[in-house]
Image (spheres, helix red, strand yellow):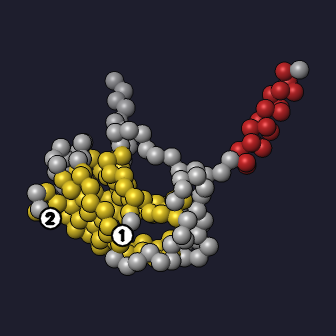
Amino acid sequence: MRPILLVLLPLLLWANAEAVTFRYAEPPLGRLVFNQILDGAVTAPLRLPKIGEYYAELIIEAADGQQEVVLNEPLALSLDVSVARREHALLSRSVTVNFAPGERVKTLFWLNVPDHLPNRTDLEMRVSLRDAASALPSSARLRVQLTRKIEFSPIIVR
């Protein structure tokens, strides 16, 4: 009986893997430092807790949060991103992203903290669409996220 299970179990797992669809999952707490829905323009507080690399992403998601949105044709969006501290601009970027059909996530840019921005400081991040997102399906919305990259410490063998 056991040899049959050893043969069938990998086949069952492989068959089940084909049925799984891609779903976006938020990064664990502590890594996600900015997470806002982009509706024309958004301004929100930003605090970078640790030194390291951070990356900004633009995500196309369903407006109801339940179904996946699939683009049938290419989509080009232009954004302006700025980070300020007490009305003093620390960073300003203009980014153009091109989504191919079927793509849902694009990386906008990378930051090194404290090279580009200070850590453990109260900042304000503003993201705005430069052009109207008229080509975006009505059932979709845009989300902007800034996430700290996972950094593994080296293994030291003594």
Of the pair 157 and 16, the residue shown nearer to us: 16
Give the residue drawn at x 36%, y 55%: 36
Mark 1 surroundings within 10 Å by alpha-carbon count, few (fewer than 14), some (14 through 19), many (20 or more):
some
Earlier-in-chain disc, 1 versus 2: 1
Say whether residue 55 is visible.
yes
Residue at mark 1: 40
Count up the numbered dots.
2
| Residue 57 visible from this viewpoint | no
- Res 72 quadrant in image: bottom right
Residue 43 vertical position relative to residue 152 in the rendered view, above or below: below
Q: Position of residue 154 (x, y in %)?
A: 35, 36
Which residue is labeled 2 in the image?
Answer: 89
Q: Where is residue 78 in the image (x, y as percent from the top left)?
A: 37, 75
143 vs 22, nearest the viewer: 143
What distance separates the C-alpha of mark 1 from that of mark 2? 20 Å
Label 2 neighbourhood size at 10 Å, few (<14), some (14-19), many (20+)?
Answer: few
Q: In this view, does 136 lie to the left or right of 5?
A: left
At a point 24% along the width and 52% down the height, the residue shown is: 45
Q: Which of 18 and 11 is in front in this view?
A: 18
Q: Where is residue 6 in the image (x, y as percent from the top left)?
A: 80, 28
Relative to 105, is 34 above or below?
above
Residue found at the far top of this picture: 1
Circle number at residue 117: none
The C terminus lies in quadrant: top left
Quadrant (top left, top right, bottom left, bottom right) of the N terminus: top right
Q: Does the residue at mark 1 contact the one at mark 2 (Cβ under 8 Å)?
A: no
Q: What element carries label 1?
A: loop
